[in-house]
Image (tube, helix red, strand yellow):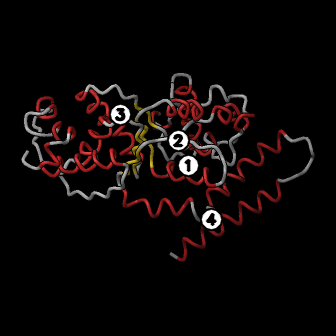
Amino acid sequence: MNDPALSESPSAAVLEEGGPFAREFQGFHPRRAQQEMAAAVEYAIRDRVALVAESGTGTGKTFAYLVPSLLSGGRVILSTGTRHLQDQLFLRDIPAVREILGAPAKIERLKGRANYLCLHRLDQSDGMLFQGVDEVRDLARIRDWSTRTDTGDRSEVSGVADDASVWGALTTGAETCLGAKCDYIQECFVYKARKRAMAADIVVVNHHLFFSDIALKDEGFGEVLPEYDCVIFDEAHLIPEIASQFFGFGFSSNQLKSLCRDIPVAEAADKSGVALDTPVRELERAVNEVVLSVGAER
């Protein structure tokens, strides 16, 4: 390394010829662009300044930001645009880099509430109507898995698609969660995941959760993410579209359908005698008509 900026960077040294990565990773080839990016990220973290880095295919950008993140000694939030990359970082990339560096950093992954099984809703599922063999089969698999999982992360369930309709009845959003009033608060997978994240050094999230956390703070509610020294966005090109979802206004047909599904369950437990069957059916029919008309226009 002849460049002073690189020669003075511990992060770049890790990625140079003869460094830890070259010794531990078979087939690893030092790349100057990767070393330059690692040094730039290191200095940005140290000096607490913003950095925008664009790298071409084959640069090795993931290691270029993971190495300085783990060497920094501070708390770092890593935010991705997709859950696929989030899982890859948490399950594969970060553990590999941490082992090579011998870094004692504690790593946790945190997803949005809808990615975790709601134990209250699972308990209520006996009183819900499920349509078709697929939903009944999926429910049985989820119930079996629920007795073994430590995280409640729905991506763990084999044989049940992430977009399976049954998940709508077994997960919850911020507007429907019972919070501290829930009988399952101590066992709640969301509560436990957030507690682990508060004690972690590296927290892997996605952009949806990151900007949701900012929106909650702006509205005066408690934060989801811990205080951090640095945030690194991967897949940053997705930020404008995702951020606009949290700083704009709107509602979706799925939210209305979820409301229609939840009302009968709440009504069954209500003793006021107010009949909501007809309004619920009318709302459900109106939502379906709008969805069909929009689809026809396309």
Question: Residue 50: x, y in percent?
Answer: 36, 55
Tag on residue 156?
Answer: none
- Distance from disc 3 to disc 4, alpha carbons, whole Å, reads 40 Å
**Which residue position is annotated with label 1?**
213
Q: Secondary structure at mark 1?
A: helix
Dot 4 or dot 1: first in sequence order is 1
Asked if the residue under mark 1 is in contact with the one under mark 3, i.e. CB atoms within 8 Å, the reply is no
Q: Secondary structure at mark 3?
A: loop
Considering depth in this image, is 162 or 218 the residue closer to the camera?
218
Callout in the foreground (4, 1): 1
Q: Residue at x 52, y 63 (%)?
A: 244
Outermost residue, top side: 148
- Distance from disc 3 to disc 2, alpha carbons, whole Å, reads 18 Å
Question: Residue 274: x, y in percent?
Answer: 90, 50
- Distance from disc 1 to disc 2, alpha carbons, whole Å, reads 7 Å
Question: Residue 169: x, y in percent?
Answer: 63, 43
Residue 64 position by quadrant: top left
What is the three-letter code of the residue carrying label 1?
Asp
What is the three-letter code of the residue carrying label 2?
Leu
Classify 10 Å Cα crowding around label 4: few (below 14), some (14-19), many (20 and above).
few
Classify 10 Å Cα crowding around label 2: few (below 14), some (14-19), many (20 and above).
some
Dot 4 or dot 2: first in sequence order is 2
Classify 10 Å Cα crowding around label 3: few (below 14), some (14-19), many (20 and above).
some
Placement of 255 over or under 144, stated as above or below: below
Asked if the residue under mark 2 is in contact with the one under mark 1, i.e. CB atoms within 8 Å, the reply is yes
**Which residue position is annotated with label 4?**
250
Dot 3 or dot 4: first in sequence order is 3
**Which residue position is annotated with label 2?**
225
Callout in the foreground (3, 4): 3
